[in-house]
Image (spheres, rainbow, N blue to C red):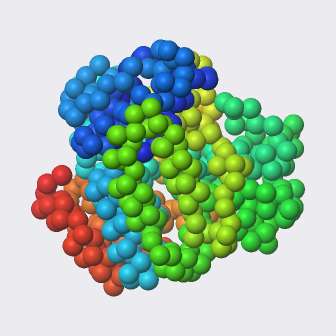
Amino acid sequence: MRLTIAGGGGFRVPLVYRALSAGPFAGLVRELVLYDVDPARLAAIEAVLASLARHGPPGSGPSVRAVSSLPEALDGADMVFAAIRPGGTAGRTADERVALDLGLLGQETTGAGGISYALRSIPPMLHLAEEMRRRCPEAWLLNFTNPAGMVTEALVPVLGHRVIGICDSASGLVHRAARAAGVALPEGTLDGVGYYGLNHLGWLYRLEAGGRDALPELLANPAALAGFEEGRLFPPEMLAGLGCLPNEYLFYYYCTARAVAGMRGADLTRGESIARQQADLYPRLAAAGPNAFALWDAARRSREEGYLAEARASGEHRDETDLAGGGYERVALAAMRALSGGGTASLILNTLNTVRGATGPARDAGAGSAAPAVPAVPGLPADAVVEVPCRVTPDGAAPVPQDRPGPAQLELMRRVKDVERLVVEAATTGRREAALAAFARHPLVDSADLAGKLLAGYESAFPELGRLWQGGR
């Protein structure tokens, strides 16, 4: 199989190559094509992969080809991973700072920063999807580009069920909670797991083992909760009242003031910290020769330890338990293996909210279709992209029906989904009014006045938004 990575100069690409070189995914891909618009970043990642290849048996990893032409990258592709960042780390910093300067949450995927990021990400991702439809129409697109749920929803009209959103946050929560509860959860199965939500906005509400739900006992055990990251993020009494475990990104909704204070009190935003690291790191990687992988791996560990730093007490560090859970590359490769006929996989993915089946999404249905699609998450539209456990086969990702969320959870999901759809409308039609409404409607903004100031700030930082409103993608 030929796998193309759009955003091939991205920092996490070596994780994909390493997983393809040893273990259960070895031999799955014969050629890895890296596409990026930044030749310097491509050269640095090529150096890391070459260094990594030296550590394994000869020929254990796929061959690697780096290209700067999108048509060349897509011709002959069987699978496409997309992880692009329009504007780079400077764009991420602006996403954070414009919001923080107004006293609002400054985070790249959640709230105002996530809206700004999506407005810039969706147009180039649509171009990628349209090129795929022309050059490799049978290929699957596994989307990592953030905000993953929003971007995936924008691509469904172009690629239908052949686009699937990937995020490891939900699966990481499930595996860490299962470990803390003493529940055996073999890789490749989510039997007994109940999880519903949108990307970066979901809840684990059931964790069965042998027909018994172990989650209530875990939620009533402060010592067990203190043993993993999500259990420490939220007060035990709050978790007991919720009756479920929130995804780590719900920290920004449930503990907003604490999150904003932590971000504003830091010397650097997360984006600024990563920008500083990468400005120094990438030139060193390109010149490091056989030591490139070791240099990259040390930077990876440092980067992961700084994740969600605003949520942790001073001096608290993430340990191996916090970092466990599979990683986004393993989620993606497990999905890829199942899509290519390597057996069924059970994964939490971003896909259309319908149990009809991956080959018949609601918005693709013709006049002669059978009964209307039933939503996997009751209370949300069947044609909305949600994040739920899915059964993955060569036919696609079919969501598993979930319980109806509680009233407060459902209201939050509906409101954020309204925002997501306004953002998709703004990015695909160029309607500035839709973008303004999205900022105002978001629960972490909730103000028409602040919405206007946010949009003006992002327009000043990103001239491409002005071109978008003028009708250019």
- Place residue 208 in its image quadrant: top right
Q: Residue at x 75, y 50 (%)?
A: 177
Look at the image and tell me whether residue 194 can be seen: no
Out of 150 and 6, give the one closest to the viewer: 6
Q: Residue at x 73, y 35 (%)?
A: 191
Figure check: 19 above or below 236: above
Residue 27, position in %: x, y? 51, 16
Residue 83, position in %: x, y? 38, 43
Figure check: 242 above or below 370: below
Left or right: residue 112 versus residue 16 is left
Figure check: 287 above or below 309: above
Look at the image and tell me whether residue 23 can be seen: yes
Out of 333 and 159, give the one closest to the viewer: 333
Left or right: residue 19 versus residue 384 is right
Left or right: residue 232 versus residue 323 is right
- Place residue 238 in its image quadrant: bottom right
- Place residue 338 in its image quadrant: top right
Out of 424 and 316, give the one closest to the viewer: 316
Q: Residue at x 42, y 78 (%)?
A: 100
Figure check: 349 above or below 102: above
Residue 239, position in %: x, y? 75, 66
Q: Quadrant of the N terminus?
A: top left
Q: Residue at x 61, y 22 (%)?
A: 24
